[in-house]
Image (cartoon, coloured by chain):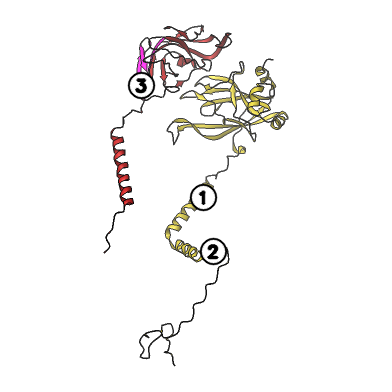
Amino acid sequence: MSHPPLAPGRGPVAPDGGPARGPATVAAPAPAPVPRPPGDDEFGPDVAKLLLRAARSWWTWVVAALLVVVAVGTWIAGGFEEVPEEGLPQVPVDARIALGPYDVALQGWSVSRDYDRDTLEVVDGDAWLIVAADLTGAPPRSSFYESGSVTVSSLETTAFPKIVDPVSGDYLSYIHPGVTTPVLILFPVTRADGETLDALTTLPVLLTSYTFTTHSLSGEEMWLRPQPRATVQLPRDDSVVPAVEEEE
Amino acid sequence: MRRRRWTPGAIGVGVALLGVVVLAGLQEANREVVPTVATTIRGTAGEEVTAAGTVVEVGDAWSTTVIEQTDDITDEVERAETSSRWLVVRVSWSGEREPSAVPDYTWRDAAGVEYSPSDRYGFRYQAAQPGEWWHEDVLFEVPVAAATAGTLRLLPEGTNLDLPMEIGEITVPEVVAVDELTLLETEPGRG
């Protein structure tokens, strides 16, 4: 028994050259599927095809180009790094610096472990860093104290700072436009930070300003967009403390 | 050609969607339109102004550099000085239809700058019954230029957020300058 010839690359052909009718060859039994080892990526070839298709799409390259432009633009604009304090102007003590909702003039600082112990315990602090300052409110309306407007380099407080009246010790809520209010800014700090501060004679203070603008979600006008503005090397002045010591 | 048949599930979903659309339309058609923009009610010192359910009358206004007031808790008389000006506005109020008070005040000067009450003013929210009057001295700390004349604004923010909001604006054409002043406590009666 002879088999019809097979043309290369084609199916079986009849002796007259036409396509063979009926089974020309006996099909060999299909090989049993080889079981894939566990963890083998059976979608691998499909993913490769998808990647190939994506690479051929000009949309892919447009999006990639946009990402590159955004990344380069961010890098040129300074990236997401904080503005280094070294690049900020250092202003003298008592200089009046406009921070947006108010102007601030710093005078001195000290550390107290005796003032308002009850509040210290509530906020898990061991001592108060006390900074004496004059705050003069700015238009268009009375403002609250912005807790980030006066900070100390690399110091993390145990709670938000507060401002109090230097004479009565009463907590203050508002700073009024055109009115200069002497205040003590109270920063609750840990025992370790208190000891570190006690060893200092000069306090590195960072002043941050705000812009009066409309909140993008609520539409309310408020002081937003904090921006480091200046630094002050503030000398220690323990005389700020007795005015706020609690009487036994 | 196969004929598409509507199953009970499809019919049920369609009816439910139609119901939602009809109910939403009914809700929208019958919705009470409540103005969300605050209405400003204006008046002048000496007049009764009704805003946000409270009848308010502004009396005299003074400016000074020294005030004395009695502490609400300790009853001690406290004396306070300022390098700017204390602005004191005497305000009387009464409930319109139910017990009410003015939750918040601001003073607006001629330039449009707004001042919140001084921290020394404290929190004195005292509701007055309809027909009953209370009065008090509202204290602001302002620059000299803002202590000659201005507008006392009665703000509904605080405890009364009913809509529509009503803001009262009472013009105070004259502020009398004095050397010092003793502030009244919140007292019943018209001031």
Q: Is residue A55 magenta?
A: no
Q: Colour of chain A?
A: yellow
- Callout 1 amino acid: Ala
Q: Is residue B51 magenta?
A: yes
Residue B30 seen: yes
Per the image, the residue denoted by label 1 is A71
Mark 2: few/some/many CA within 10 Å (<14, 14-19, 20+): few
Give the CA distance from mark 1 to mark 3. Answer: 49 Å
Residue B35 picture location, percent across and down: 33, 28
Tell me the red chain: B
- Callout 2 amino acid: Asp
Q: Which of labels 1 and 3 is toward the front?
A: 3
What is the chief secondary structure element of the magenta stretch? strand
User: Over which residues does the magenta segment extend?
Assistant: B37-59
Residue B71 picture location, percent across and down: 56, 11
Q: In this view, which residue lies farthest toward the bottom?
A: A1
Q: In this orientation, which residue lies closer to the viewer: B41 or A82? A: B41
Per the image, the residue denoted by label 3 is B40
Q: Chain of mark 2?
A: A
Q: Is residue B100 above or below residue A159?
A: above
Q: In this view, which residue lies farthest toward the front?
A: B8
Residue B110 seen: no
Q: Which of labels 2 and 3 is toward the front?
A: 2
* Residue A41: numbered disc: 2
- Callout 3 amino acid: Thr
- Name the residue located 49 percent from the left edge and 79 percent from the top edge: A29
Q: Secondary structure at mark 3?
A: strand
Check contact, mark 1 vs mark 3: CB within 8 A.
no
